[in-house]
Image: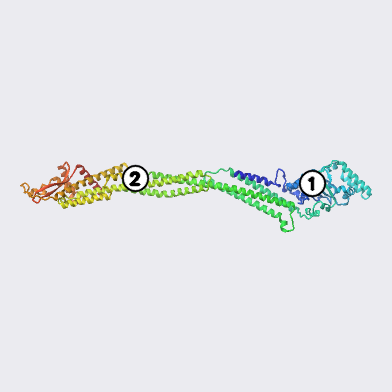
Amino acid sequence: MTKGFINSLKISVFICTDEIMQQEIRPLVAVDIIEQLHRQFAILSGGRGKDGAPIITFPEFAGFSEIPDEDFLNVVTYLTSIPSLEAASIGFIIIIDRRRDKWSAVKASLTRIAGAFPGNLQLVFVLRPSRFIQRAIADIGIKLYRDDFKMKVPVSMDFFGPCVCLISTSAVLRLVELYHGHLCLRQTQILGTVIEGLIISLCPLCLDLFQIIMLNSVSDLHGYIDKCQLTRELGGTLEYGHSQWIHHRTAIENFAMTVKTTAQMLQTFGTDLAETELPNDVQCTEELLSAHTDHHSKLKDELKLAVKQGATLLTCIREPVTRSANSKLSPDELENVATVERLLAQLDETEKAFDQFWTKHHLKLEQCLQLRHFEHDFREVKLTLDNLMEAQAGFSDVGDSVTRVEHLLREQKQLEEKGQEPLEKAQTLALHGEQLIQNNHYAVDSIRPKCVELRRICDDFTNETKKKYDILGKSLELHKQLDKASQWCEAGIYLLASQAVDKCQSQEGAETALVEIEKFLTTAKEHQLSNPKEFYNQFDTILTPEIKANAQRILQKLEDVQEMFDKRQVSLKKLAAKQTRPVQPVAPHPESSPKRASPKTTRPAGVATNRRSAEITCPPKSISEAELSKKKSIKKTKGGIKIEVMHEASQGGSSRVLVMSESDENLSTRRRTMNERKQNNC
């Protein structure tokens, strides 16, 4: 499109030179010879011959012989350059009005025309001098060679050159003046014959390059040229104002020059636009777009001014027709109208071509600016998203407690809220990029990958955030379950310790203890602690070594407590089952005295110690006693601790039933659990 536009502008510039501004052929314009034109020694009235040949008139001009040859040549050359090439090819008709002049003026005019006329000359009409003396020679010639003068006498363009060299026309005229009135008709005829023969003898080689027709009056001229093609000075009706003609010619040439200059400016501007490299940043692109837009606006103003100038000129040329319906424009004026209309049409075509080029160039600049903005926003959003992803990658901790996990969740929430605005910007920017692609942006290959990358980063951040929430959620659930398990273990140990041995001696007490244990064990199912292995496997994928060790410790604690409950249940069930057996009457033995059967005297120290140990969670007043008993029990029993329940028969006999036997390992677990509870209470 750029090359096509520039080529069209070159054509427009060449066409704008037209028949007016072709500098290689017609270097002259009216302004160059304005003074010579104002002298009005030669005019192009606008009239045409019967075959359409342009008419150039040499009106009466007293100082014609004093006009410099250069001025004469410039004016005649300029006048012959005005008609169209088609009209000029027919040939020009020259009318020389010398009715008030001398024969020498006729001779001088013909001599200059013959020697310097630049165009194709068809006819020369000469209006002879009207004064008596100056017409004497003509009268003689007319009377002697009337028929020949009525015919078109062929005369060479160099006809009067040798005459000037060999004979003095003024001498001949002087001779006529001297003998005028003294010569008879016969002598006058002889003198005319001598002059005519002299002229013919001096110019034997007459060429028919153009024809000279000697006319006695304007009425004779009307026989060759229509009156409507002649000015009033020649008896015609053609309106002609020399000053207005010069004004029109100057205006037309100025307009043609304006069109040419405007086309050249458009061509130069178009070349600059085509050779301009697109900037790589927003500021330079905005400056370039602003500069080109301003330049385009100025050129558009120049175009509008040129169009207005042409329209005004066209109105001025058509003014006679507009003012009077009976008026008609001369052929030259019609050519002027056609020239201006042609220039306006060329200007309009140039403007359309320029507008089409500018539309595409302006669109490209706007798209370039859009691209630079997109790239700038992309870099900013990409940097923000990278920082978010880096911050998110730093959240690798899953927490080692409920408090820590809740803190991490709050931080993750803050990061998510912080990332909402950049994510929205990224999504908006990606959507904007898609719109640019849909609008046939020239940089599709650069925009599409960036849109894909933005959406990928947004998806990665969203997915990673969701993954973090899932991990932290499981971690929170894990630690809550571990805390619940630990609390359950503590509560279970407390329950076991709070069951007094003396209360379990009876069947009702044993059954009550069993119910309490069974009821407590049902809470394990509520807390999903019934299967420790399954609980452990549920969170195995998110466990760190530290959390895994803690979970293993708590799960081991769960197993230990569960084992304690199982053993306690077995003991209580045995005790409850033995209480239901019938009591056999037995004769008392001497050694089975009531004093010996008293639990206070016969109960082993280990049993008392264990009872005190089981009541370690009782009110504070018994803590010192329990500790004292515990110390004694440690000294007396190095093996396992046995908790026994004594059952006395109705006959005063006694039977010892083992309620629960705990190993050293279980004792160690209980002690560890109690210490943890004390630390937590502290």
> Mark 2 = which residue?
398
Q: Position of residue 258 (x, y in %)?
A: 67, 49
Q: Position of residue 580 (x, y in %)?
A: 14, 51
Residue shown at the point (48%, 43%) measured from the top left: 449
Q: Earlier in the sequence, mark 2 or mark 1?
A: 1
> Is residue 331 something that shows in the picture?
yes
Find the residue positioned furthest to the left: 590
The circle drawn on residue 132 is none
Of the two numbered discs 2 and 1 in the rendering, the one whose residue sits closer to the viewer: 1
Q: Position of residue 85 (x, y in %)?
A: 73, 46
> Mark 1 = which residue?
122
Of residues 86 and 550, the one drawn nearer to the viewer in this rendering: 86
**Quadrant location of residue 322?**
bottom right
Quick check: 618 left or right of 120? left
Query: In which quadrant is the N terminus drawn?
Result: top right
- Label 1 secondary element: strand
Dot 1 crowding, Cα within 10 Å, few <14, some 14–19, many 20+:
some
Report the number of discs: 2
Quick check: 364 left or right of 339? left
Q: Indicate the amino acid at tag 2.
A: Val
Quick check: 332 left or right of 582? right
Q: Indicate the amino acid at tag 1.
A: Gln
Of residues 502 and 369, the one drawn nearer to the viewer in this rendering: 502
- Label 2 secondary element: loop
Determine whether label 2 and label 1 are within 8 Å by CB. no
> Is residue 628 something that shows in the picture?
no
Dot 2 crowding, Cα within 10 Å, few <14, some 14–19, many 20+:
many
Q: Position of residue 237 (x, y in %)?
A: 78, 55
Quick check: 436 left or right of 142? left
Of residues 492 and 541, the one drawn nearer to the viewer in this rendering: 541
Work out how far the residue at label 2 is from the one at label 1, CA to CA, in angstroms.
Answer: 112 Å
